[in-house]
Amino acid sequence: MPKLIASLRHTVSLTLNGRRVEGQAEPRMLLSDFLRHELGATGTHVGCEHGVCGACTVLIDGVPARSCLALAVQSDGAQVQTVEGLSPDGGHTLGVLQEAFRAHHGLQCGFCTPGILMSLDGFLRASPDASEDELREMLSGHLCRCTGYATIIKAALHAQQRLKEERAHA
């Protein structure tokens, strides 16, 4: 019987934060669990496990997705970016969004922060000129019990401006 169970595991290869990686996953393994337990990307947090809170949000092929609702095997061959991938140099310095959250106190306990950062990263790439109301609407898909969202909005608006400036100078 153990051989049968072992044969149900599949090799999943994906590009994680710009680096090709692979690991083993049973067909029912969630992407969030695969990232955390197989690949060591523990910045992806798991909150509700129902796709409601947004803490587990990652980018899959550039699009924000709840990793607790995706199976690891569905991501085979995909580009997956987690919060660890926001740092421009592999974790030694903060990315624009991370720096804005630090500067504007956009986090308290920090549990929801990785998912919010990943949603904002995808959203601001797709909608660089989004209004404050559009930012608020996008963030309504995330639960934060600590901040009251005001500092998150300030940080998001600051990051949006910085990203626009970077694009103008590129």
Image (tube, rainbow, N blue to C red):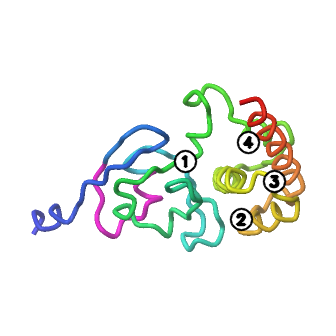
* Residue marked by disc 2: 142
Among the two numbered marks 2 and 4 on one chain, the one whose residue lies closer to the N terminus? 4
Is the N terminus in the top left, top right, bottom left or bottom right quadrant? bottom left
Question: As shown in the figure, which amino acid type bears the numbered disc 1?
Answer: Thr
Spatial CA distance of label 4 from label 3 is: 16 Å
* Residue marked by disc 1: 82
Q: Nearer the viewer, mark 2 or mark 4?
A: 4
Residue 26 is one of the magenta-drawn residues = yes
Residues shaded magenta:
23-35
* Residue marked by disc 4: 97
* Residue 140: mark in rendering: none
Q: Are marks 4 and 1 in contact (CB under 8 Å)?
A: no
Q: Is residue 161 left or right of residue 46?
A: right
The residue under the point 48% across, 50% down is: 80
Secondary structure, mark 1, is loop
Among the two numbered marks 4 and 3 on one chain, the one whose residue lies closer to the N terminus? 4
Q: Is residue 77 left or right of residue 124?
A: left
Q: Are marks 2 and 4 in contact (CB under 8 Å)?
A: no
* Residue 129: mark in rendering: 3
Image location (x, y in percent) of residue 135: 81, 60
Q: Nearer the viewer, mark 3 or mark 1?
A: 3
Secondary structure, mark 2, is loop
> In the picture, residue 75 is in which quadrant?
bottom left
Instruction: Determine crowd level at label 2: few under 14, some 14-19, many 20+ residues with C-alpha closer than 10 A.
Output: many
